[in-house]
Amino acid sequence: MKAIIIERFGDPSGMTMVDVPSPEPAAGQLLVATEAIGVGGVDAVIRRGTLGGYGFREGIVPGSEVAGRVIAVGHGVDPAWTGRSVWAFTGVGGAYSEQAVAHVEDTTALPEGLSPIDAVTLGSSGPVAHFALAHAHFAEGDSLLVRGAAGSIGIMAVQLAAAASSAPIAVTTSSPVRGDRLRALGATQVLDRAGAGPDSPAEFDVILDIVGGRDMPSFLDRLADNGRLVSVGVVAGHPPEDFGTKLMASFQRSRSFATFSLNTVPGPARNAIREGQFAAAARGDLACVVHKTLPLGQAAEAHRQMDAGEVVGRIVLTL
């Protein structure tokens, strides 16, 4: 079967399509004939080689989520899964391929009316946004800033927050066009990448930061009393090692910083939220924003567009 591998860490030119053996599902796993593959920010971080300390090696098949049809099951898996349309989490890699394996507990059946393409725009990002807001204790009346809101996690966070609170929901983004898209999804204020903009609130109760990088500490200064900044991504790299000094300098304001990973949420809870969000998307109550669909063989082009900051929503690879 065909698969994309990261032959060389660095820019997207290090990705190439190769022939690899078809996987076989182990006990507790499903084999999915892939129809759609979500291209996420973490894929780009892995491809750049900046996470070598986490055990990633050249030759990895990147990607973590697919949607398609189950064509085989491993030992102990109900055969009734065979033939069903599903979304599946493949782990830290393995998704950029014609077939992918996933554990049955990391698989969610698709409802009628939800396409595989829409499923991979929502399957990971929706639960991350939901539980990140919960981790920040976001509630009615809380103002929110989503830093890096044009990606799939940010888009879901804006929609969920708009449904939960009538307070201002601000976003940082790189262009007026992106800002207009985010306003249509529930954002009330659009700021530039530095957090500046007309009538911008000075402070926020909650900040969800998907960007990280060297500028992240400046956003700690935008927290209100008892404000909470939750880091849910580092697409621009890790923040400076001394970023905590910003919090200590404003000790009496009780500001806080936390990280959030979906890995800390039990599987049944993740699946329950995902099922509910899939149903909402099928009804039209949640928007699945697809920037572009590209064939699997153009995975490198998808990464070039992400690196150029051109993407609003998610690029989806199709077969």
Image (cartoon, rainbow, N blue to C red):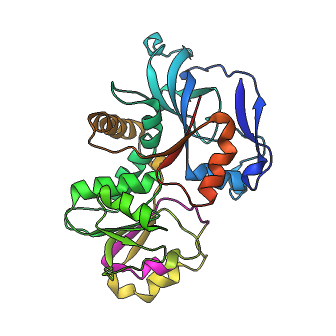
Is 256 within the magenta?
no
The stretch of residues the image draws in magenta is: 218-237
Locate residue 266: give its quadrant: top left
Q: Is residue 6 above or below residue 78?
A: below
Q: How many marks overall?
A: 0
Q: Is residue 242 above or below residue 31?
A: below
The residue located at (44%, 47%) in the rendering is 125
Left or right relative to 199: residue 306:
right
Q: Residue furthest top?
A: 79
The residue located at (33%, 27%) in the rendering is 113
Query: In this orientation, which residue lies closer to the viewer: 63 or 113?
Result: 113
Image quarter of the C terminus: top right
Q: Is residue 54 above or below residue 191?
A: above
* Residue 215 position in % (x across, y down): 54, 76
Locate residue 238: give its quadrant: bottom right
* Residue 267 position in % (x across, y down): 42, 37
* Residue 41 position in % (x across, y down): 57, 53
* Residue 309 position in % (x across, y down): 57, 61
Query: In this orientation, which residue lies closer to the viewer: 207 or 2?
Result: 2
Image quarter of the N terminus: top right
Query: In this orientation, which residue lies closer to the viewer: 293 or 61?
Result: 293
Is 236 within the magenta?
yes
The residue located at (71%, 49%) in the rendering is 55
Left or right relative to 66: residue 186:
left
